[in-house]
Amino acid sequence: MRYAIICDVHSNLEALEAVLAEIKNHRVDRVVHLGDAVGYNANPNECIEILMNENIPSIMGNHDAAACGLDDPQMFNYAAKQAIRWTREKLTPKHHEYLGSLPETLILDETILLAHGSPGSRDNYLLDWKHSMAEFAIMAELSIKICFFGHSHLPSLFVHQGRDHDLQNYAKHTLDKSNSYLVNFGALGQPRDGDPRACFGIFDSDEMTVEFIRLEYDVLKAAKKVEKAGLEIYLSERLLEGV
Ligand code: ZN
């Protein structure tokens, strides 16, 4: 099976449309989403509508939980909190209900876990190999070999055993079936590694490869919409800079 994996759409319609169009060139069998359909940007209902219409299996991110009232955005920074309040006002009942119905995690082929923050927690920021050790232990208990995650918005590939614990040359990697991996393809709707291009990835479970892909899209249009919506100007600026 070939999977396209997207994460952290964050109400960015321009990035979502561009990435889904690009995915059509990659001969995938399924597209999956690792959570945070909403928050930060200006098109929450439109993005959810696309995820629903395209039958893209999704899990619940921390912004999704806050936007539909299942969680309190108390720990969010000021701009993120304001965007959640704005999103709550904009969400239609149908799209609100969709967010509330999302599962915490999904499992593919028995050994592949889809999580938002980390295998152990939706809210965990998994930033380096040292932090990943406890998560690899949780994966071993669940007989999970590969976990795809998001939340940090930083492309990452952590390897359980071996010399290169943090792989930072984000291109195409062949995975070793006897090893375990934590893979973050980066954020589709709000990249934070200094590159504003949208992120997504391809996982081929037959070839055991992961491919990190970046895509230019109309970021200026998305940023202008954020301003026009009355959201914090910082959210528009960070989109343009990819931070
Ligand atoms: Zn996010």
Image (cartoon, grey):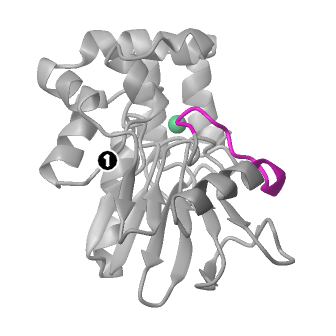
**Residue at point 53% right, 83% down?**
209
Question: Which picture quadrant has residue 126?
Answer: top right
Q: Amino acid at mark 1?
A: Ser
- Report the side of 103 relative to 138 (left or right): left
Q: Position of residue 176 (x, y in %)?
A: 63, 85
Residue lying at the far bottom of the rendered structure: 207
Label 1, secondary structure: give it: loop
Residue, disc 1: 58
Q: Residue at x 48, y 29 (%)?
A: 62
Say which residue appears at 43% left-offset and 16% top-offset: 71
Q: In the image shown, does 242 or 185 lie closer to the viewer?
A: 185
Q: Position of residue 38 (x, y in %)?
A: 38, 31
Camera-side residue: 206 or 145? 145
| Residue 172 location (% of width, % of height) | 60, 81
Q: Would residue 87 be found to the left or right of residue 224 on screen?
A: left
Q: Hey, which quadrant is residue 27 in on the image?
A: bottom left
Query: Is residue 126 a member of the stretch shown in magenta?
Result: yes
The residue segment tinted magenta is 121-131
Residue 135 versus residue 47 in the image, above or below:
below
Q: Quadrant of the C terminus?
A: top right
Q: Is residue 41 visible?
A: no
Residue 25 left/right relative to 165 = left
